[in-house]
Amino acid sequence: MPEIDASAAGTGTGAIPAAGGVVVPSLAGTSPRRYRRRLANLRNVRTALADVVDALEAGTRDPSVARAIVYTLATMVAVFREEREARVATVIEERLARLEAAAGPVSTGRPAP
């Protein structure tokens, strides 16, 4: 088993002993680019929701923060559904207009006023 580099461990250099006794550099003190989740559709929102639930179950997410995230995700779901319903309604209206135009004038059986 390799030895832990005692000169780096615990001296504030950011080295952390890893499994197997190997010293690896820490990310502490660095500013890595923060990962931003792209929530562009329901599938992405569903995945984000699953991640929040997993983090809650693992105990790595504060429940009050998770509650706020879930509320935001639920709001996004409602917005996506409204957008989808509006698109469907538009398609139906367009199809109906084409059918009515193709059918021509419809007789009601009554004389025109």
Image (tube, rainbow, N blue to C red):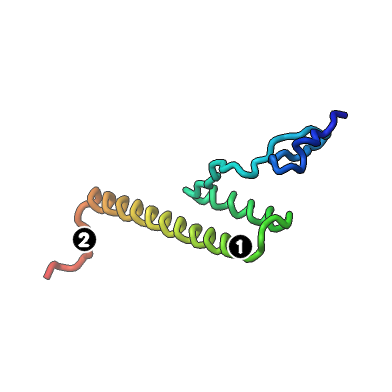
**Which element is circle 2 on?**
loop
Distance in Å between CA atoms under marks 1 and 2? 62 Å
Quadrant holding the C terminus: bottom left
The image quadrant of residue 55 is: bottom right
Q: Position of residue 111 (x, y in %)?
A: 15, 67
Q: Is residue 53 above or below residue 19?
A: below
Quadrant holding the N terminus: top right
Res 107 label: 2
Question: What residue is at 58 percent from the left and 51 percent from the top?
Answer: 48
The image quadrant of residue 12 is: top right
Residue 6 lies left or right of residue 108; in this view the side is right
Local crowd size for mark 1, using a 10 Å CA cut-off: few (<14), some (14–19), many (≥20): few
Res 85 label: none
Question: What residue is at 56 percent from the left and 43 percent from the top?
Answer: 31
- Going by the picture, which residue comes out furthest to the bottom? 113
**Which element is circle 1 on?**
helix
Q: Position of residue 59 (x, y in %)?
A: 73, 57
Q: Is residue 104 above or below residue 23?
A: below
Res 65 label: 1
Three-letter amino acid code of the residue under disc 1: Val
Residue 95 lies left or right of residue 75; in this view the side is left
Q: Comparing marks 1 and 2, which lies closer to the viewer?
A: 1
Three-letter amino acid code of the residue under disc 2: Ser
